[in-house]
Image: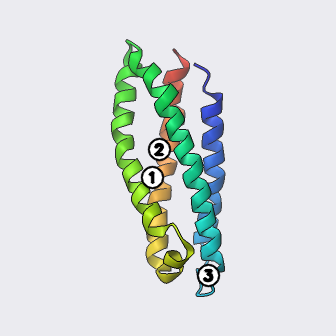
Amino acid sequence: MDMSSFYQEHADLAVIVTRLKGHIAKPITGSGELAAVIAGDLTQLSTKLNLHLGKEDLYLYPRLLKSAGPEKALAEAFQKEMGGLKEAYGAFKTRWGNAQSIAAEPDVFIRDAKAVIQALETRIKRENTELYKAAEKI
């Protein structure tokens, strides 16, 4: 299976995540300017992430789950894990989806953002090195 577009989507997501990491390294002040930039980046991340996950659900997982080899078990495990990450990211986006909420509690936002970013980066790395490599074999 050709996985090049999936890898590219991960690279695109990583660019946004890197920007967010740069933003949260700075103080989020009461002016709200940085909070507005962060909220915009979160919207962009959510859009790209939802499209990517939808594509995986539509094309990648069905193909892997039809395979008879170890790829099927790997896909099942990844799907099960992903449910928790989707929920966690959804809750994060709901709570921090606008500049006002970010500016109101910047320290809490930064803590939550670091946790979500770490989870996304870990997931992307594992998909690139395990799941996508398995998909390339079928």
Residue located farthest toward the bottom when viewing the structure as drawn: 30
Q: Nearer the viewer, mark 2 or mark 3?
A: 3
Residue located farthest toward the top when viewing the structure as drawn: 68
Q: Position of residue 73 (x, y in %)?
A: 34, 24
5 relative to 93 in the view: left or right: right
Q: Position of residue 63 (x, y in %)?
A: 46, 20
Which callout, 2 or 3, points at the residue further toward the start of the chain? 3
Residue at point 60% right, 68% down? 38
Residue at the disc numbered 3: 32
Residue at point 38% right, 35% down? 79
Query: Residues under labels 2 and 1: Cα distance?
Result: 6 Å
Type of amino acid at the residue the image marks with label 1: Ala
Q: Is residue 135 above or below residue 53?
A: above
Circle 2 packing at 10 Å, graded few (<14), some (14-19), many (20+), is some
Residue at the disc numbered 2: 123
Q: Which labelled disc corresponds to residue 119?
A: 1
Residue at point 38% right, 55% down? 88
Residue 18 visible, this orientation: yes
Which callout, 3 or 1, points at the residue further toward the start of the chain? 3
